[in-house]
Amino acid sequence: MVFALSTMQLTSDAFQEGGRIPTRHTGEGDDVSPALRWTGAPEGTRAFAVVCHDPDAPVVANGSYGFVHWVLYNVPASVTSLPEAVKEHTNGMTGFGKAGYGGPMPPPGHGTHRYYFWVLALGQDVRLEAGLTLAQLLTRIEPHVLGMNRLVGTYSRG
């Protein structure tokens, strides 16, 4: 699977690129997803997927590394933003073993982790069932990815 960054831009009112994710959006707070918005989707975009991954988590399992905090898909091309605590669209499974957003919460004393929020533009409106893992999602959408980009936030436990 080969993915490359595109000219799409992903931003949030909750935090800036490289900035600290507010406690409200973490497992130590209200554990709600931050509002996100994106621009510059490639021509021909028919749908989006959004994921959040922590590559700094000390987890290696099933040929992958890090920890998955969010898998959201079946987002129509007409959508260019997600509200805080979004309830629409289809949730996949996180590393917490549940569907839906699970905010940052690195192990105590583990320092600052980076959280990669990704938006992927798809050239086909692939209707997928709920509960896919990140690996399953990427396998299913890979042939349809037209572009992608990320917003990285940080968090450490107090």
Image: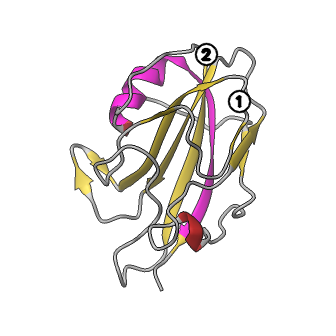
Q: Where is residue 69 shown, x and y percent of the image?
A: 43, 53
111 falls in the magenta region: no
Q: Secondary structure at mark 2?
A: loop
Q: Residues within 10 Å of mark 2 (few under 14, many from 20)?
A: many
- 106 left or right, relative to 41: left
Residue occupying image coordinates x 71% and y 30%: 79
Q: Which residues are magenta?
A: 135-154
- 150 left or right, relative to 62: right
Q: Hey, what amino acid is under mark 1?
A: Val
Q: Secondary structure at mark 1?
A: loop
Residue occupying image coordinates x 42% and y 30%: 138
Q: Where is residue 64 shown, x and y percent of the image?
A: 29, 46
Q: Which mark is residue 79?
A: 1
Q: Which mark is residue 44?
A: none
Q: In the image, is residue 103 above or below residue 107?
A: above
- 24 left or right, relative to 77: left
Q: Which mark is residue 123?
A: 2
**Distance from Cα at disc 2 to Cα at disc 1:** 14 Å
Q: Quadrant of residue 13?
A: bottom right
Q: In the image, is residue 150 above or below residue 32?
A: above
Q: Quadrant of residue 39?
A: top right
Q: How many marks?
A: 2
Of residues 62 and 99, the one nearer the viewer is 99
Q: Where is residue 40 shown, x and y percent of the image?
A: 78, 32
Q: Quadrant of residue 119?
A: top right
Query: Sequence-wise, which precedes: disc 2 or disc 1?
Result: 1
Q: In the image, is residue 116 above or below residue 82?
A: below
Q: Residues within 10 Å of mark 1 (few under 14, many from 20)?
A: few
Residue occupying image coordinates x 36% and y 47%: 94
Q: Hey, what amino acid is under mark 2?
A: Gly
